[in-house]
Amino acid sequence: MHRPSKLIFSFVSPGVDATIVLLCLQLLIFFPFYWLLTVMTDNRDSDTLTLVDNSFGRLPDHLLIEIFIRLPVSEWAQISCVKKQWASLFLGECLWQAALMRTFPSASQAKRWPGPIPQGLSKRRFAALYVGKHIVALDNDIDEIVGHTYLFLKEQLELSNMPPPSGILHGTIIDQFITCGKSRDVAHELASQIWLAVLDNLEENQHTFLLLKRLALEGDVFLPFPYSRSIKVQWRVFEKLFTDFRDCFDQADYYDVLAIAKNKFQPIPSAWLGF
């Protein structure tokens, strides 16, 4: 059986009171039990729940932060729903600064960059770096800029009922990378990879179908390289429409989009055919 002391002391800074360390251990052991009690019971006067709640209430915010940032990111949303105190920590800047420094220590050396897409506060930077590492995954020194650009594009496409034309969004992305010193070829390739990653991570719902259909029906406008849209990105739009969203079409829209696809791509996959 492993001794818990090394585990717990790796979670906290030197000099922390032993009582607090023991409370840390208690939190880690009882967290799943506490969450189940909080969510599944309506008896808020339960002696057991009160005892556990009081124990957790003794933990100071800075220690809770040290624990939370060592738990898997996938659990943070669930953790923030357990108590109002915990939710407020995830809304504040301190937790995200700590998470940023622990997960991406080199982020402290990053300088702000020029361009239309800003860097943002610690929570935004953490999300951008996480995206750059786990979703776009270019494995180089531009993860944060790529992550911010991904978030910018995804929000523009998802959160707006009428997003700007794709040419404007694509041009904004190209300008961001060129302003940061990337060559035209690199800017075009990065923009294409970000578009593909965003398209692959859109939710499958009516909004996404209407968005993809609008992108497919946009007229071609001649733009000089690197502002011209990648053929790979255009292909992915039609591919998702004819595979993931085929059942959403009415007959007229299907044949309109199919006609545009035949004009752009020769030949087209047989899987796209047949309403």
Image (cartoon, rainbow, N blue to C red):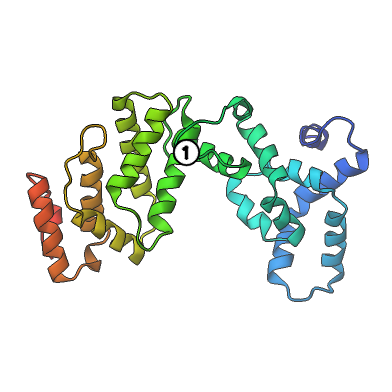
Asked whether the viewer can see residue 98, the reply is yes
Residue 186 x %, y %: 33, 26
Residue 196 visible in the shown view: no
Work out which quarter of the rendered image holds the C terminus and state it: bottom left
Which residue in the protein does label 1 denote? 147
Q: Is residue 138 above or below residue 207?
A: above
Q: Could you tell me which residue is drawn at 8 percent across and 49 percent down?
A: 263
The quadrant of the picture occupied by the N terminus is top right
Q: Position of residue 162 (x, y in %)?
A: 35, 61
**Quick one: 125 or 24, which is closer to the camera?**
125
At x 74% / y 59%, what residue is drawn?
33
Q: Check disc 1 and report its element: helix, strand or loop.
A: helix
| Left or right: 160, with 92 as reference point | left
Residue 214 percent across, percent down from the top left: 25, 59
* Image point (83%, 55%), residue name: 56
Residue 100 position by quadrant: top right
Q: Quadrant of residue 57?
A: bottom right
* Percent x, y of residue 259: 9, 57
